[in-house]
Amino acid sequence: MSTLYDLTDDARGLMEALLAVGAMADGTDDEGIRAEFQAAQETLDAQLAAIHEQLGTKSDSYCWVIKALSAEADAYRAREEEFAAKRKARENAAKRLKDALRDVMEALGMDKIQGTDYTLALQNSPPGVSQVDEQAALAAGMAQEVTTVRVDSRAIIAAWKASPESLDGIAEVHQGRHIRIR
């Protein structure tokens, strides 16, 4: 069976041939030659119809594979969520155990515990900042004002639908095409 690309090339070739035969048929006044062109057009039309049928069969095959791959991706996504939950549970369990060891060491005033396989040592973490009075920090020169601009894509698309010229120099709207499988 032909590939999708072969079928596409064949269909393009037949469509070009149909245009050429049609142009030649229109360019002649001889009824005999016109009848030959008509017969050639009918043959090319039949070949093009056969290619369209093959394209339908080929597209069905593609759709079966697309559906199977999408289902497999969905199954992987579900497993990702399952594994993410398990990973998070294990990370939290490890953190609770580390916190328990740290609490014991701090309660006993120990900076180091020597085991047979591992050595534990308390270490200062990098400093962090919380509960900041933003206005006071700004007045003291320890903060800076930041202005953010949020683009309203929906408003731009609405303006584009109303008048595409109104967006010249403001935004470029693009609209692609996609396949819907029903």
Image (tube, grey):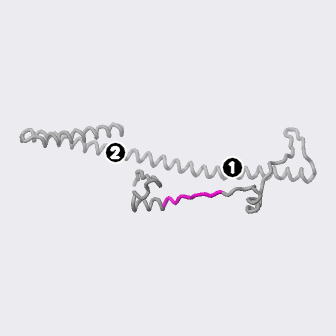
Residue 34 in percent (x, y) is at 10, 41
Q: Amino acid at mark 2?
A: Thr
Determine crowd level at label 2: few under 14, some 14-19, many 20+ residues with C-alpha closer than 10 A. Answer: few
Viewer-nearest residue: 144 or 180: 144
- Residue at figure coordinates x 31%, y 37% from the top left: 9
- Residue at figure coordinates x 75%, y 55% from the top left: 142
**Residue 150 among magenta residues:** yes
Which disc is residue 87 wearing?
1
Viewer-nearest residue: 136 or 158: 136
Viewer-nearest residue: 64 or 136: 136
Residue 1 in percent (x, y) is at 34, 37
Residue range of the region highlighted in magenta in the rendering: 146-154
Q: Amino acid at mark 1?
A: Arg
Residue 8, by quadrant, is: top left
Residue 125 in percent (x, y) is at 81, 48
Determine crowd level at label 1: few under 14, some 14-19, many 20+ residues with C-alpha closer than 10 A. Answer: few
- Quadrant of the snapshot with the C terminus: bottom left
Which disc is residue 57 wearing?
2
Residue 137, by quadrant, is: bottom right
Numbered disc total? 2
- Residue at figure coordinates x 28%, y 40% from the top left: 12
Is most of the magenta stretch helix, strand or loop? Answer: loop
Left or right of 103 on screen, residue 73: left
Residue 50 in percent (x, y) is at 26, 43
Left or right of 72 on screen, residue 159: left
